[in-house]
Image (cartoon, grey):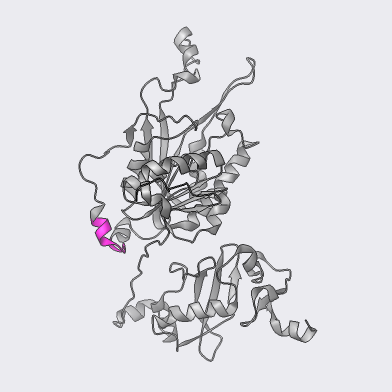
Amino acid sequence: MSKNSQKNRTLTKRRGKVAVSVVREDTPEWGAVRTTAPRKYRTPSVALNRKYAVTTVSDAKKIAKNWLVSFNLENAVDFGLPEVDDRYHVWRVPLVRQGTNKRVGEVVLDAYNSMVLAEETTKPDVIESRLLGRTSSTAAKSGQTQIPEQMQASFVRNTVILGDCELALLEMPSQSVDLIFTSPPYFNARPEYEDYLTYEEYLLKMRRVIHNCHQVLCEGRFFVMNVSPVLIRRASRSEASKRIAVPFDMHRLFVEEGFDFVDDIHWVKPEGAGWATGRGRRFAADRNPLQYKPVPVTEYVLVYRKHTDKLIDWSIRNHPDQHAVKDSKITGDYEVTNLWRIHPAFHPEHPAVFPLELAERVVRYYSFKNEVVLDPFAGTGTTGRAAVSLNRRFILVENEPKFIEVIRREMLSWLGGATKHVLFVGCEPPDTSGLLF
């Protein structure tokens, strides 16, 4: 490529003292020239590596224009120079007043699926008000029609993914999940889970997963986590055992990653369920003060809501499927306190499954029919099974091939012929030839 042609394929834009390379409209992303720039303003040459659906400035402008057409604003504004923000996996398309460089807003696109992100994009009435030299409140008082925000139904189908959930979540469309319910791996509670060298490393992994879950969860919807303190057994008689308050550290991560605390539900197991750990035996024998340690028979079910200024009633009234809302009403008896008495579950191929009844309660109380429920630490697929039993869709992500094999095998019994429609990523679908459809 000649120097002149290469020069024509890129522009250098100055932001203070930092040079930023930006692709022209007709330039495919691989024609970009890398420069030293802050992460937020890197050139779109990352688009292919990230497998973005939107890869060029021209693509971004076309999508933004189609959005403007739906509000009859396409002839009122021009575009500034779109930029890709690979930290948040979005394209930002500036909107300017025609014939000037005066900015009146921006359209923000999900780089992975090309959808316009309504919550990040400047509202149409605000754009119109700025074009007319009015404030939004003035426009409202003048009787101009205010365009209500609309929720969108997720198009994601039932999916099973073999892989690290931290990475798998990056490949999912933003705001495509209506509920997240999971129980993360214990930190060193059993030999099977000794995957993390330090507790700090474990928490860092959980933070990254929670952060990525925030991106795929719809605005104002719930993330419910089953978690409990873990006991680190002593290595010798001269050492003391240590109990780590994992739920309280998880709470800090949720709040710092953009979630609002809602409830702490306590899953109560039958008395004596924790006796096998040996906790409390010493006090039972000697009855000496300071030796007292109660046998744990509860686990936390922590409930968080993705931060939003909208009330829960808004999510109900603006749901795109009002028939599903009506059909999802809770009938009969229900849990009125935060004490849920449920017997533990056991699985011959997994050391720590939660009971189907627990998953069913969470799915029933925090989602509507036909919605999408995600479990990023799926284990043997209990959340998926609960979702199907309550007419919801599921996304199951699991990093252990042996547990994916359990899901593939057992799915035939709880999903039946519909198994053939499940999307399997990173693993082969089960043989459904013997099922009657």
Q: Which residue sits at x=30%, y=64%? A: 318
Give how far across and how far down residue 152 sits, in percent.
37, 65
**Does residue 65 appear left or right of residue 2 in this picture?**
left
Q: Is residue 325 magenta?
A: yes
Residue 133, quarter of picture: bottom left
**Image height of 434 relative to 170, above or below:** above
**Does residue 225 appear left or right of residue 233 in this picture?**
left
Magenta-highlighted stretch: main secondary structure? helix
Residue 410, quarter of picture: top left
Residue 412, quarter of picture: top left
**Image height of 150 relative to 399, above or below:** below
In the image, 196 versus 284, the foreground residue is: 196
In the image, 45 versus 226, the foreground residue is: 45
Q: Is residue 67 magenta?
A: no
Give how far across and how far down residue 172 sits, in percent.
51, 58
In this picture, which residue range is highlighted in magenta?
Answer: 317-326
Q: Residue furthest top?
A: 286
Count the numbered circles shown. Answer: 0
Point out the image quarter for the N terminus: bottom right
Would you say residue 305 is visible in this rendering? no
**Does residue 46 appear left or right of residue 53 in this picture?**
right
Give how far across and how far down residue 113 sits, in percent.
50, 67
In the image, 311 versus 298, the foreground residue is: 298
Would you say residue 51 is visible in this rendering? yes
Q: Residue furthest left?
A: 332
Q: Which residue sits at x=26%, y=52%? A: 328
Q: Residue furthest right?
A: 3
